[in-house]
Image: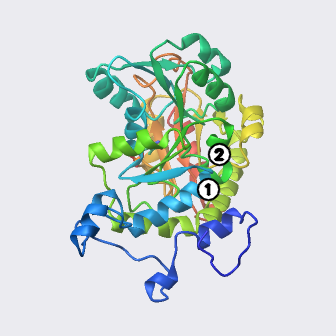
Amino acid sequence: MTDKKSGNTAQPSVQTVLTHQGREPDDQFGFVNTPVYRGSTILFKTLDDIEAQQQRFLYGRAGNPTTESVESIVTTLEGAHRTRLVPSGLAAITIALLSCVKAGDDVLISDSAYEPGRVFSDGFLTRMGVTARYYDPRIGAGLAGLMQPNTRAVLAESPGSLTFEVQDIPALAKAAHAGGARLIVDNSWASPLYHQPLALGADLVVHAGTKMFVGHSDAFAGTISTTEAAWPDVERTRRELGFFTSGDDAFLVARGLRTLAIRMKEHQERALDIARWLESQSDVVQVLHPALPSHPDHALWKRDFTGSGSLFSVLLAPAPRASVAAFVDELKLFTMGYSWGGFESLCLPVKLGKNRTVRPWTVEGNLFRLHIGLEGVEDLRADLAAAIERYTRAR
Ligand SMILES: *Cc1c(COP(=O)(O)O)cnc(C)c1O
């Protein structure tokens, strides 16, 4: 914490961390926010200075006060040793995986993990001599049976992208550690406010900062938070690969984080409201939201999470493509697009094909992923009610 005046040693609340940490007004002429630092070159005054390498910053690629302000907030929220800000959520996943492996090693990835992470593993990692295998997101302690002597990393995402399976992080951590591997968890959905994987045994936590942290659909960022043991490998990998996040982007992440707690609360309430309502609508077969008692992993969610996110999927009864088009083409408030986490609601028709290999998606019907934004809930409900009506009519 940077609150120099309080002298209070009690752990500050999450809301206080979000509003106060990562700011040093005394260093910024009293201005509230850490400004955008732009710079590659950092100057040294004497030969002694450049040889000693003791300055806080040596070269801009390793970070600046704006990027560090974001890193310090996420470190506190995740209960981590340290955090690195990287240019995207995907970069957070790829750097985290690369930090664990060398040629000849093996990684295990959840079948429900974010698809571009799979593409990286099947492509880049395979070309570098690392094998990538997939596991059932509901495997839990059964992961032990898949571990090989050369397995060095397990990549979990809880709940999973598109299908929202909740994973047993403590059980996965136990199996990974017994086999000498590190557990990486993608925590983008819940944010550190509602789920803290490091406390449950994970070694690395990654975020698509692009989503809830930024919160306004206007910047890319990722974070990697680690235990003390995992940190040197992550920082070495990032440094060797040359990843850098600009002060401009870091500023937008910091600005987003200031309101993360109230945005998460609003997104959570609205998403739950709409998810519950959808459960009783005609042609709705299933709502895939872990905080609903009907969700198969609800007990696990309740055990390990303190809240839920903006994002869930809804499965509609089997119908031809014309119904899917009728549903999405005339939406008034929901718009179609990748990504999520902004203030605006999104609807994505989901195609689960090559991105499920262990548990092929065989469920009949059409799946839609919804990100519930900050519009009026009644308006969003009306938009969806009309869409379902069009869907049914077009069957
Ligand atoms: C979007 C997303 C990512 C990737 O983030 P980008 O910033 O778009 O690269 C990673 N994980 C999850 C769960 C995501 O939804």
Q: Could you say which is closer to the camera, residue 91 or residue 128?
A: 128
Would residue 253 be seen by someone viewing this image from the given angle? no
Cα distance, mark 1 to mark 2? Answer: 8 Å
Horizontal placement of 73 versus 301: left or right? left
Seen at 34% across and 29% down, the residue is 119
Q: Could you say which is closer to the camera, residue 120 or residue 239?
A: 239
Q: Could you say which is closer to the camera, residue 111 or residue 19?
A: 19
Horizontal placement of 240 versus 166: left or right? left
> Would you identify the image quadrant in which residue 378 lies?
bottom right
Report crowding for label 2: few under 14, some 14 to 19, many 20 or more residues within 10 A (C-alpha). many
Identify the residue position indicated by label 2 in the image.
Answer: 196
Seen at 52% across and 36% down, the residue is 161
Looking at the rendered structure, the kind of residue marked 2 is Gln
Position of the N terminus, as image quadrant, is bottom right
Identify the residue position indicated by label 1 in the image.
Answer: 77
Q: Secondary structure at mark 1?
A: helix
Mark 1 touching mark 2, by CB under 8 A? Answer: yes
Q: Is mark 1 within 8 Å of ligand 1?
A: no
Q: Secondary structure at mark 2?
A: loop
- Against 100, residue 214 (above or below) is below
Sequence-wise, the earlier of marks 1 and 2 is 1
Report crowding for label 1: few under 14, some 14 to 19, many 20 or more residues within 10 A (C-alpha). many
Seen at 41% across and 68% down, the residue is 66
The quarter of the image that holds ligand 1 is: top left
Q: Position of residue 91 (x, y in %)?
A: 37, 44
Horizontal placement of 277 versus 256: left or right? right
Q: Position of residue 342 (x, y in %)?
A: 49, 59
Q: Is mark 2 within 8 Å of ligand 1?
A: no
- Against 284, residue 8 (above or below) is below
Q: Position of residue 120 (x, y in %)?
A: 34, 31
